Amino acid sequence: MVRLKQVITTICLIWFACFVAQGQSRQERFEAIEKQKSAYITKQLKLTPAEAQRFFPLYNQYTKEIMDVKSQKNKRAADAGNSPRSNNFRGGQDIIEYDAKEVEIKKKYRGKFAEVLDQTRASQFFAIEQEFIKLLYKELDSRNRND
């Protein structure tokens, strides 16, 4: 009986260690992608060092706000999918409200970015961000085909 408890405890500890290690590697991958994204944005917007120093704190705030709204949206979508009333109008309306929040955040930060950059480059930021996301998807697709 004691031997069985030791085996079960060992298996649980190994499983937990693997789970934690996997989470750390995701965080490391996320940080590496964010560094690449920052470099891509810097290059595409042709940021000077002074502009980059003022721009990236705003960018980090923008990213946090967008991620918060997307997280809330995904949670709401998951909750609606588990609800027997998931096809009702109110559920769809809530999702659209999250999209509207994202647009409002983008409008707000376009103005803040324009204070650091000019209006043209502030508007270009959003297209550049989408280009980077497309590049990530292409890279992922390429890796999946090679595996």
Image (spheres, rainbow, N blue to C red):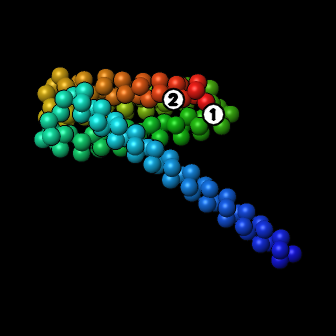
Confirm whether residue 94 shows in the render: yes
| Residue at which label 2 appears | 140
Residue lying at 77% horizontally and 66% vertically, measured from the top left: 8
Which of marks 2 and 1 precedes in the sequence?
Answer: 1
**Mark 2: amino acid:** Leu
Residue lying at 27% horizontally and 32% vertically, measured from the top left: 41
Name the quadrant of the C terminus.
Answer: top right
Q: Position of residue 119 (x, y in %)?
A: 16, 25
Q: Which is closer to the viewer, label 1 or label 2?
A: 2
Q: Position of residue 84 (x, y in %)?
A: 68, 34
Q: Secondary structure at mark 2?
A: helix
**Mark 1: amino acid:** Gly
Q: Secondary structure at mark 1?
A: helix
Confirm whether residue 111 shows in the render: no
In this view, the residue farthest toward the front is: 146
Mark 1 and 2 residues: CB-CB less than 8 Å, in contact? no
Instruction: Point out which mark residue 44 bears.
Output: none
Name the quadrant of the N terminus.
Answer: bottom right
Residue 130 as seen in the image, left or right of residue 89: left
Q: Quadrant of residue 60?
A: top left
Q: Quadrant of residue 124?
A: top left
Position above or below: 14 against 1: above
| Residue at which label 1 appears | 81
Position above or below: 37 against 53: above
Residue lying at 62% horizontally and 26% vertically, measured from the top left: 87
Residue 41 as seen in the image, left or right of residue 84: left
In this view, the residue farthest toward the right is: 1
